[in-house]
């Protein structure tokens, strides 16, 4: 069933602010004896015990993915990678990321490794698979109890195992606030978190999709920027500078709205892009025709701005070095 992902993202981000954040309203401590200490295999091929090696004594951020997802997983993972960047050296030292597959039958360590590399996951981020019954038992305890891949949980689970503090959040909320919430799980960071709380989030980073003077900018920031840049180079997907000059507008609109369908139809450019970026293919995000037009206009304007800046001659200070021998 084709889901309207864009509407779903907005709804999820809204719900995350109005429902109780505690994973366990009864106050039961999530710790040893609650989480299965089952064997799991990491994206690096290491066999670990889930509780002893990945949770015990740690502050963790957990999300749920599968590598063949043609829906929201790639964008959610890319936004989590942006959170990783915001947390910097804390990841792998004070805070640990865990991505649990919901498709252990197909997500081998090799596939997870390619996926991790596509998102430039650092050493503090572990992608986890294992025997299907073991992974499902672990995910069930984490609240991921869906019966179909397309309906799996998209929230992240935050936990401080030593203190028993657990809660949910959503990477489609403002990422600065998500990073601050994660840091607040660490008692050592309380003073830093208080100092870092922004007074007013910037329109581009706000959880809403409508707070931008330029059409397409907020949509680009939320859905495209996690995987693409404009003029900085390839990321999870290709650099988008000049894409409006290289591609026909109708083709761009169709691809933005449903890249999965175009790949299935063997569109040659879509096939070439899939081959160039094999680990993660662009998902179908339910973007409407008008929103696609706004995105194209924004990409066109940003490319023009960069081109103008590149053509404007600079006036460096006079260099006398040629007079010295």
Image (cartoon, rainbow, N blue to C red):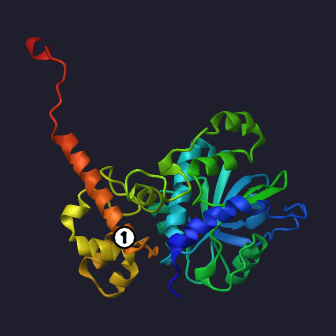
Describe residue 61's horizontal placement relative to residue 241 as left or right.
right
Choose between 61 and 202: the one closer to the eye: 202
Describe residue 189's horizontal placement relative to residue 66 as left or right.
right
Residue 207 sits in quarter? bottom right
Residue 158 appearing in the image = yes
Q: Residues within 10 Å of mark 1 (few under 14, many from 20)?
A: few
- Residue 150, position as x, y percentages in the image: 58, 81
Choose between 273 and 192: the one closer to the eye: 192
Residue tagged 1: 290
**Residue depicted at x 68% and y 38%:** 193
**Residue depicted at x 84% and y 64%:** 24
Describe residue 256's horizontal placement relative to residue 286 as left or right.
left
Residue 277 appearing in the image = no
**Residue depicted at x 57% and y 72%:** 8
Choose between 60 and 265: the one closer to the eye: 265
- Residue 274, position as x, y percentages in the image: 34, 74
């Amino acid at each position: 069933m084709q889901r309207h992902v864009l509407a779903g993202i907005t709804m999820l981000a809204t719900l995350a602010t109005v429902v109780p954040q505690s994973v366990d309203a009864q106050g039961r401590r999530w710790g040893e004896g609650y989480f299965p200490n089952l064997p799991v295999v990491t994206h690096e091929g290491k066999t670990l015990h889930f509780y002893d090696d990945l949770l015990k004594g740690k502050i963790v951020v957990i999300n749920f993915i599968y590598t063949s997802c043609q829906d929201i997983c790639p964008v959610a993972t890319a936004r989590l990678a942006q959170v990783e960047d915001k947390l910097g050296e804390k990841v792998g030292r004070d805070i640990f990321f865990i991505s649990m597959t919901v498709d252990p039958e197909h997500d081998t360590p090799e596939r997870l490794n390619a996926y991790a590399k596509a998102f430039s996951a650092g050493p503090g981020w572990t992608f986890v698979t294992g025997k299907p019954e073991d992974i499902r038992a672990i995910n069930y305890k984490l609240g991921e109890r869906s019966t179909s891949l397309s309906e799996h949980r998209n929230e992240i689970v935050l936990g401080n195992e030593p203190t028993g503090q657990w809660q949910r959040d959503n990477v489609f909320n403002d990422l600065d606030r998500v990073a601050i919430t994660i840091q607040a799980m660490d008692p050592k960071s309380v003073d830093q978190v208080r100092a870092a709380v922004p007074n007013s989030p910037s329109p581009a980073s706000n959880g809403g999709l409508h707070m931008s003077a330029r059409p397409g900018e907020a949509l680009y920031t939320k859905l495209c920027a996690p995987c693409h840049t404009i003029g900085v180079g390839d990321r999870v997907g290709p650099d988008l500078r000049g894409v409006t000059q290289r591609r026909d507008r109708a083709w761009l609109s169709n691809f933005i709205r449903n890249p999965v369908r175009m790949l299935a139809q063997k569109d040659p450019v879509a096939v070439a892009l899939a081959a160039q970026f094999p680990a993660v293919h662009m998902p179908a995000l339910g973007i409407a025709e008008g929103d696609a037009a706004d995105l194209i206009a924004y990409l066109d304007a940003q490319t023009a701005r960069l081109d103008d800046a590149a053509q404007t001659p600079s006036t460096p200070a006079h260099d006398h070095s040629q007079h010295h021998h």
